[in-house]
Image (cartoon, coloured by chain):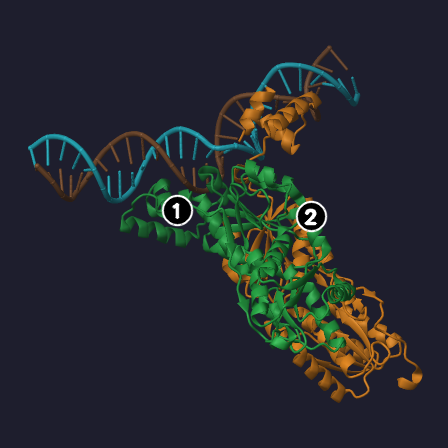
Chain colours: A orange, B green, C cyan, D brown
Amino acid sequence: MPTINDVARAAGVSPSTVSYVLSGRRPISAETRARVQAAIAELGFHPHAGARALASSKTNVLALVAPLRVDVNVPVIMQFATAVVTAARSYNHDVLLLTKDEGTAGLERVAHSTMVDALILMDIERDDVRLPAIRRLKQPSVLIGLPVDHAGIACVDLDFEAAAGLALRHLAGHGHRRIGLVGPSPSVYRRQTTYADRFLAGFLQVSGELELRTATHPCEPGVDGARAALADLDTELPGLTALVVHNEEALRPLLDLLRAAGRRVPEDISIVAVCPRDVAVAMPVNLTSIDIPAHDVGTLAVETAMRLLDNRRVDFTRLLEPSLVERDSCREIGPSHR
Amino acid sequence: MPTINDVARAAGVSPSTVSYVLSGRRPISAETRARVQAAIAELGFHPHAGARALASSKTNVLALVAPLRVDVNVPVIMQFATAVVTAARSYNHDVLLLTKDEGTAGLERVAHSTMVDALILMDIERDDVRLPAIRRLKQPSVLIGLPVDHAGIACVDLDFEAAAGLALRHLAGHGHRRIGLVGPSPSVYRRQTTYADRFLAGFLQVSGELELRTATHPCEPGVDGARAALADLDTELPGLTALVVHNEEALRPLLDLLRAAGRRVPEDISIVAVCPRDVAVAMPVNLTSIDIPAHDVGTLAVETAMRLLDNRRVDFTRLLEPSLVERDSCREIGPSHR
DNA sequence: GGCAGTTGTCGAAGCGCTTCGACGGTTCGC
DNA sequence: GCGAACCGTCGAAGCGCTTCGACAACTGCC
């Protein structure tokens, strides 16, 4: 492996000049620059990452802390990861992948040993135990999610509260007055990831504002969970004409159950789903849905990290505007049904 | 951030002694060791990764090159990644996540700049264009998959050829003589990942050995693909009594179609699936299946990398024995049907 | 009792890079 | 035409660690 000294010798300049050509931090004449670049290309020189980190206190590496349990939402997690890696590369950074289950120790390990410049964390819980540690790190962090006490920490997420409102307004605009919410599984509530609560809060508030008749129910995974949730909603809200489904996993069994019961979508019941686009269009009926913009959120997280790294202003809380795409699962109902 | 010098001063020893306490590469008296460790704990010292890498030429980081396109097999990819990260941590290594689409350049970038000690690559194609570059790197690589020309490169994968044989022998053992194979989507064949071909080869060979009547068909994604594949198999092999499905995605639509046509599983038609365990048991009928042991493969890949790093012997090609788990989708058929 | 070997520690060199101050040579403003 | 400001380059220091050789103090052996 050639070093910067080899390049300097080959180009007939000093090592510092090579460094300045590489970093552009001081002016270098066109001819010198050309000679240096030629030498670099010819020798196949790549600066040694460790040496660089040591001398400059920058690693050009981001940590991504992901929940690598293999359960729900795998596709969403993957989309986040893809977006983060891609965005990071566009800023000339690489990504170190940590699992959430190393917990606080993992963060401190990579931060204290100066392996990374900044951290991006997914799957943030309401009172995430890692928060104090995160605040203590000298590296900046960006959270994907919104814990209760997020003062002074950059957070990025979809505005789930607005998303719920959007779903309800869409249905109400089509004449629906009795609307059920199929929520995430109880384990999500238990884990205290806040998106479930934020969605629910938005749902209840807009339900009140529009004076709708609504009922809400979490939904256990599997066919049985879906069956139970549906039965409960039907009982609490007889004659409901629409469902908001904030539970990817439940979509398929729910549609199966409805079909089995002879309830057609959208003729007899309308559905708005909150899920990634691919999931919405992979169903037997193309679902009108509010996208989980994993790609945008991931990209924004990286951008925010970059801004923090060069001390530019950031909005500490960025909740992305939800957007609803109409497909084939909602229909207008006449006044007689209202 | 305290440095090794701070620790040395606090413990009243020289920096090199601290280093030897940390690495254990020279004997240190119990008392000295205790003093040093106390100082380390008190100061919260963590060695600087870059400095370490510079001095020792070891980064304790592995590169994982994953296909981050968001399409089929996301859960499997996730399982590999999880296994790799977990195993790496157990060897005190971290994982740098690269996307396949950076191609050869990505590998060379991290390898030449000495960011990683070894590389693990997923989604290897038959004549993978990265192979020559991989051979040139000074860092060892482990492939998850089996390219044609794998001489001198460590490869780890499920033995898909044996898996096909296992599936056929299981069905034949239950009296089935007319068996169809629903293969991966044509895009997988086009991409030239070899597992599809290896499975097919095993299928055809054992089909011959056992003198079975078989037909094979790739399967486009979606309900329509499944419908077409099923129709073709029925035409080519009228009266088929069993299906081997080597296509995760096709399972669900296939089952839906069979049910819609009034063909019961396993009463009218038996099925052996090749897919992760979770997928097999998430279906309406619990499927007898051959697992894709992503966890084992990932772990083995890391172990292999570690052995290569400390110059221990490795089997350059390790194909994991498939195992079949009986569930509820195969039934014994009487001689009258044979 | 003398020599070889072990044990425990130290000091210094060096890994490959960035960055700071210095410096000679130009250019510019007035 | 003179000082100020800038341009382009160099040399040296230093980032924080590992590792090698040296060495003093023991231990054991004949």
Query: How many labels were placed on the picture?
Result: 2
Residue B312 seen by the camera: yes
Point 53% across, 64% down: residue: B323
Where residue B218 sits in the image (x, y, percent)?
71, 58
Point 85% across, 72% down: residue: A170
The kind of secondary structure element at disc 1 is helix
Where residue A135 sits in the image (x, y, percent)?
57, 58
Amino acid, disc 1: Val
The kind of secondary structure element at disc 2 is loop
Q: Chain of mark 2?
A: A
Q: Residues within 10 Å of mark 1 (few under 14, many from 20)?
A: many
Q: Quadrant of residue A151?
A: bottom right
| Image vertical order of residue A7 relative to residue A249, above or below | above
Where residue B326 sits in the image (x, y, percent)?
55, 72
In this rendered view, identify the residue nearer to me: A78 or B301: B301
In this rendered view, identify the residue nearer to me: A29 or A297: A297
Amino acid, disc 2: Arg
- Measure the C-alpha gap from mark 2 to mark 1: 35 Å
Q: Is residue A229 left or right of residue A45?
A: right
- The quarter of the image holding the C terminus of chain A is bottom right
In this rendered view, identify the residue nearer to me: B321 or A37: B321
User: Share a chain, discs 2 and 1?
Assistant: no
Report which residue position mark 1 lands on: B7
Q: Is residue A242 left or right of residue B298?
A: right
- Indicate which disc residue A312 carries: 2
Q: Quadrant of residue A91?
A: top right
Residue A114 seen by the camera: no
Q: Is residue B290 left or right of residue B1?
A: right
Where residue B56 sits in the image (x, y, percent)?
44, 39
Q: Chain of mark 1?
A: B
- Indicate which disc residue B28 carries: none
Point 45% across, 52% down: residue: B91
